[in-house]
Image: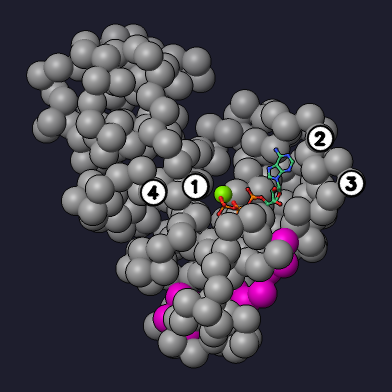
């Protein structure tokens, strides 16, 4: 079982509740001979949103992809160190990668619905994973997932329309519904709002806040305001290193490292 661990200076209100969902230790990621991530150790907590921030090219996406073995799809990529999900090594030979990616779902920068109906976008995963007995159960999963993703009311009368016909913000909520449909434990989001306008962004941020009671969420963002608004933990990356990790409020108001201070005050990046 995951144990109780605190990162950074524990503050009284959080001590009892933080439960480690994923534990990364000394993780390095190489592309060929190039080291993109250098011995990063991070805990991801249940029911918390963890934000990864840092300048472009510092390795945020690379590290995020290591958390559900998406780097496996890049031939030159190699991962060292250990990453555990509920204490289980996700890189062990016995790990079923398809299962892992259902447990640790991903939402990408650019909304990428399948060129299928809204219904089928959400039903696809549960069908593949055999999560529904029949049509009634599948319908219920689709409705529940779209409801949780805050999209049901907008699409309930047009479930057979193509997912690609939705607006950008709706498409991103559809992708979140698709991730939720297979009942994940962790949701990884790589700049999920960067292609969206401020109103669609605000909806996704509200949604993230609603969802966090149920899942461990990790979000990569270039917006420090967004990190400050949605996350409880923040990790600051620079040049492949984890510079600082702690309570979001500490990182933004009282960082320990000069490099963090420089970044959050806009000196570089
Ligand atoms: N598929 C790849 N093959 C080779 N090198 C890569 C690959 N993907 C990323 N890199 C390199 O690894 C480093 C980290 O890239 P990564 O995309 O993880 O950064 P990032 O922090 O997500 O940047 P951004 O904020 O621009 O998305 C960069 O030097 C990048 O060029
Ligand atoms: Mg990136």
How far apart, in angstroms, are the residues tagged by discs 4 and 2?
Answer: 27 Å
Q: Does the magenta-highlighted stretch encompass residue 249? A: yes
**What range is drawn magenta here?**
240-250
SS at circle 4: loop
Q: Does the magenta-highlighted stretch encompass residue 157? A: no
* 105 over 223 or under it: above or below: above
Given residues 151 and 12, the one toward you in this image is 151
Res 196 visible: yes
User: Where does residue 30 sit, x and y in percent of width and height?
Assistant: 81, 47
In which quadrant is the C terminus drawn?
bottom right
Query: Quick one: which residue is furthest to the right in this view?
Result: 33
Counting residues from the start of the chain, the first of labels 4 and 2 encountered is: 2
User: Where does residue 138 sit, x and y in percent of width and height?
Assistant: 31, 17
Q: Is mark 2 within 8 Å of ligand 1?
A: yes
SS at circle 1: strand
- Do the residues bearing badges 1 and 4 touch, measured as CB atoms within 8 Å? no
Mark 1 surroundings within 10 Å by alpha-carbon count, few (fewer than 14), some (14 through 19), many (20 or more)? many
How far apart, in angstroms, are the residues tagged by discs 1 and 4?
Answer: 9 Å
Q: Main structural element of the magenta stretch: helix, strand or loop? A: strand
Mark 4 surroundings within 10 Å by alpha-carbon count, few (fewer than 14), some (14 through 19), many (20 or more)? some
Give the quadrant of residue 164.
top left
Counting residues from the start of the chain, the first of labels 3 and 2 encountered is: 3
* Residue at x 62% of width, y 87% of height: 258
Residue ID for mark 1 = 190
Res 23 visible: no
- Do the residues bearing badges 3 and 4 touch, measured as CB atoms within 8 Å? no
Residue ID for mark 2 = 76
Q: Is mark 1 within 8 Å of ligand 2?
A: yes
Give the quadrant of residue 245.
bottom right
How far apart, in angstroms, are the residues tagged by discs 2 and 1?
Answer: 21 Å
Residue ID for mark 3 = 33
């Amino acid at each position: 079982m995951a144990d109780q661990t605190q990162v950074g200076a524990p503050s009284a209100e959080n001590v009892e509740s933080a439960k480690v969902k994923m534990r990364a230790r000394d993780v390095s990621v190489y592309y060929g001979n190039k080291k993109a991530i250098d011995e990063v150790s991070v805990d991801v907590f249940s029911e918390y949103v963890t934000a990864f921030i840092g300048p472009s090219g510092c390795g945020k996406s690379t590290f995020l992809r290591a958390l559900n073995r998406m780097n496996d799809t890049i031939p030159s990529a190699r991962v060292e160190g250990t990453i555990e999900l509920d204490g289980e090594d996700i890189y062990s030979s016995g790990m079923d990668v398809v299962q892992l990616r259902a447990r640790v779902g991903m939402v990408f920068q650019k909304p990428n619905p399948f060129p299928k109906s809204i219904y089928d976008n959400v039903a696809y995963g549960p069908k593949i994973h055999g999560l529904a007995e029949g049509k009634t159960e599948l319908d219920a999963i689709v409705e529940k997932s779209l409801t949780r993703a805050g999209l049901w009311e907008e699409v309930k009368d047009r479930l057979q329309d193509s997912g690609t016909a939705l607006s950008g913000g709706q498409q991103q909520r559809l992708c979140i519904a698709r991730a939720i449909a297979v009942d994940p434990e962790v949701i990884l989001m790589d700049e999920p709002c960067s292609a969206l306008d401020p109103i669609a962004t605000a909806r996704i941020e509200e949604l993230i806040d609603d969802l966090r009671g149920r899942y461990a969420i990790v979000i990569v963002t270039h917006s420090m305001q967004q990190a400050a608004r949605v996350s409880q933990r923040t990790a600051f990356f620079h040049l492949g290193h984890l510079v600082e990790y702690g309570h979001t409020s500490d990182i933004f108001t009282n960082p320990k490292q000069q490099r963090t201070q420089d970044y959050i005050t806009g000196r570089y990046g």
